[in-house]
């Protein structure tokens, strides 16, 4: 009878002995001249001949010091226990190879705990005691207690038995197809490292004998693998923290543990080596990390020189900030006495973010969509002020908190009124529209305190719209003179701004100086504008209403000998010609249309205030 696929060597001998009528498996092996142990395994070829098996049939399922699969590693062969799975026994299945591994505590097929003690006689199940289906006392193995196995034990059992886990769990990519042959040695090394011996040395361990000992021994490793890669990363982080903190290199910090784990070669452990480098890049704060040079992994701890470049400051300034505790970092002396300054990449990013957050006045004005002059007036009104130097993050240049500006604009958007009417934008509230600086400052204060709410908050703050009537009322209540600037007049009449300014300069349009002794620009009172319109008519407007061009009208006036005034010369051309209202009667012959227009122009002149 040939061995089953996955059947253990001892299980095979128990099954053959049972078929040949031996109640105790040891009696069958004695008949063959052996007891189960090292001597039998070393002479398995002779047993193949006695049992008339093909060459290597028993060798293929025999434990070995250089196994082809993890489950046959002789170093972890159980010598004092022979546990079983009650469910497999009840189904008449063979005894599995994984049950013989001292690192396995569960049946990977039924996902229950292995049993190694008889519940009737309380005797341990041993390799040379009992039969194939019964304990030495005669109790059927199928009647042993059934206990669900923890997930960690199931993962370990699946890896050792099959090379891959039965359950879908995240594991190193190389292990999804087949685990390396020395897997058990690697798992035992990780397990031993989590244990502390009485003498304080880690890494020394005894092979577990009972199923309970296996559960306790392998539980930490099961935790690392069931939560891959976080579980292993946490273990490596703890190793870095527990290492020699004065060591300035990764091997020096991790010590013998690093040397041992790096000794596991091959693709099967490449991901573990990479995880160590990744954690080292984050946790290691020493000055020498050559192991990371060719990995493409960015270190979390960077030198002062590199950090200063990332931030955009001089390295000396950063070193000084670390030395005085303003910036979180470490400074250590190397063997040559050189002081190494290291700063976490996250700290560097925090500084970079803070420098981006705290902006200059110019950047703040651009964000709000207002001019630098208007931004200064906002500051003068006390609506937006720079953060005090002592309250700013370290290595920050700008004084204005952009997050506070964003929050302020968002508050404006939440308070917008649902009203209609003529509007003015926030950017229009400046000294180009009025001459009363105090009134402007007070209106700005009202806006920022919620006393004057916008009706539209599309775009930037400078584009927010306010009801013109409300704004005028606020300006009037705070000393507004209702005077107009050249810009206002141009916008109301359609005249060119520079032409209006020229008429003011040559004295045709009377201007009023700033009031209250404040800084500002000259303005035009409504009554002065009305007087100007009662005396002069722009030739361009007069010609347009008469259905002709300004050039044609000027030629006609020259032929009639009627002069114009107020023209602004620009190179070979001129603009801004004015016709005196008193000269209108001399224009002849006028078309009936033009006569009607003249009468309309005269009738529409407003009364002087």
Image (tube, grey):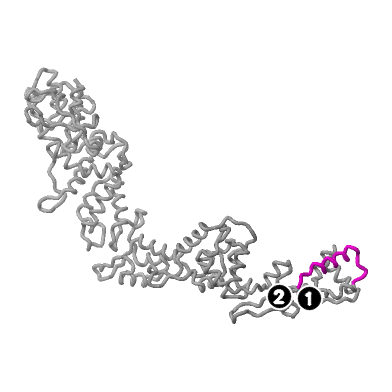
Q: Residues within 10 Å of mark 2 (few under 14, many from 20)?
A: some
Element type at mark 2? helix
- Image check: 581 left or right of 256? right
Quarter that holds the C terminus: bottom right
Label 1 crowd bin: few (<14), some (14–19), many (20+), radius 10 Å: some
> Residue 450 appears at what percent x and percent y?
51, 63
Element under label 1?
loop
Q: Residue beneath label 1, please?
A: 567
Q: How much space separates mark 2 and mark 1, taking CA atoms?
A: 12 Å
Which residue is found at the position 69% from the left and 67% from the top?
491
Q: Is residue 506 above or below residue 321?
A: below
Nearer to us in this view, 34 or 121? 121
User: Which residue is painted at 49% across and 59% down in the image?
Assistant: 411
Name the one closer to the observer, 139 or 282. Answer: 139
Question: Is residue 69 shown to the viewer in this render?
Answer: no
The tag earlier along the polypeptide, 2 or 1, is 2
Residue 501 bears which disc, if any?
A: 2
Bounds of the magenta span? 587-607
Where in the figure is residue 171, as x and y percent of width and height? 30, 41
Give yes or no for residue 596 being in the magenta stretch: yes
Query: Where residue 372 appears, x then y in whole percent?
Result: 55, 71
Q: Is residue 588 above or below residue 296?
A: below
The N terminus is located in which quarter?
Answer: top left
Above or below for 317 versus 282:
below
């Amino acid at each position: 009878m040939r061995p089953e696929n996955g059947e253990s060597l001892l299980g095979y001998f128990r099954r053959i002995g049972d078929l040949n009528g031996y109640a105790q498996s040891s009696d069958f092996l004695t008949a063959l001249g052996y007891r189960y142990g090292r001597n039998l395994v070393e002479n398995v070829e002779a047993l193949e001949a006695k049992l008339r098996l093909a060459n290597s049939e028993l060798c293929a399922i025999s434990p070995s010091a250089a196994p082809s699969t993890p489950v046959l590693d002789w170093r972890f062969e159980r010598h004092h226990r022979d546990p079983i799975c009650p469910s497999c026994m009840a189904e008449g299945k063979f005894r599995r190879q994984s049950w013989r591994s001292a690192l396995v505590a569960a049946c990977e097929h039924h996902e229950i705990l292995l049993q190694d003690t008889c519940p009737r006689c309380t005797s341990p199940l041993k390799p040379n005691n009992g039969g194939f289906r019964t304990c030495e006392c005669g109790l059927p193995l199928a009647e042993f207690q059934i206990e669900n196995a923890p997930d960690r034990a199931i993962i370990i059992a699946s890896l050792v038995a099959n090379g891959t886990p039965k359950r879908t769990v995240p594991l190193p990519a190389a292990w999804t197809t087949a685990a390396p042959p020395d897997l058990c040695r690697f798992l035992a090394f990780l397990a031993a490292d989590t244990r502390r011996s009485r003498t304080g040395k880690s890494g020394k361990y005894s092979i577990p004998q009972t199923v309970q000992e296996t559960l306790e021994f392998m539980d930490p490793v099961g935790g690392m693998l069931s939560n891959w890669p976080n579980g292993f990363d946490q273990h490596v982080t703890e190793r870095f923290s527990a290492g020699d903190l004065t060591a300035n290199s990764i091997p020096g910090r991790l010590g013998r543990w690093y040397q041992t784990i790096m000794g596991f070669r091959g693709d099967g452990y490449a991901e573990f080596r990479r995880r160590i480098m990744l954690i080292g890049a984050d946790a290691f704060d020493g000055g020498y990390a050559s192991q990371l040079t060719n990995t493409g992994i960015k270190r979390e701890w960077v030198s002062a020189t590199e950090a200063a470049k990332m931030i955009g400051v001089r390295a000396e300034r950063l070193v000084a900030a670390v030395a005085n505790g303003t910036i979180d970092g470490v400074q250590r002396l190397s063997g040559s006495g050189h002081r190494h300054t290291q700063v976490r990449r996250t700290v560097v990013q925090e500084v970079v973010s803070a420098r981006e957050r705290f902006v200059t006045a110019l950047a703040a004005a651009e964000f709000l969509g207002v001019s630098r002059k208007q931004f200064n007036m906002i500051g003068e009104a006390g609506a937006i002020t720079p953060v005090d130097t002592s309250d700013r993050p370290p290595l920050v240049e700008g004084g204005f908190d952009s997050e506070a500006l964003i929050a302020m604009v968002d508050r404006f958007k939440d308070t917008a009124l649902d009203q209609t009417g003529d509007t003015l934008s926030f950017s229009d509230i400046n000294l180009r529209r009025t001459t009363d600086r105090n009134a402007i400052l007070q209106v700005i204060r009202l806006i920022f305190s919620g006393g004057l709410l916008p009706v539209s908050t599309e775009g930037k703050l400078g584009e927010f719209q306010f009801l013109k009537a409300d704004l005028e009322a606020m300006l009037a209540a705070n000393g507004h003179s209702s005077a107009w600037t050249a810009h206002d007049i141009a916008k109301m009449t359609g005249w060119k701004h520079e032409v209006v300014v020229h008429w003011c300069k040559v004295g045709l349009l009377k201007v009023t100086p700033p009031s209250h002794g404040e800084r500002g620009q000259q303005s035009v009172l409504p009554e002065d504008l009305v007087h100007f319109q009662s005396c002069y008519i722009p030739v361009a407007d007069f010609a347009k209403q008469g259905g002709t061009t300004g050039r044609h009208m000027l030629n006609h006036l020259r032929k009639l000998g009627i002069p114009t005034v107020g023209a602004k010369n620009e190179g070979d051309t001129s603009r801004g010609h004015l016709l005196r209202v008193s000269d209108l009667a001399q224009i002849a012959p006028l078309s009936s249309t033009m006569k009607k227009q003249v009468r309309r122009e005269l009738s529409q002149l407003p009364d002087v205030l």
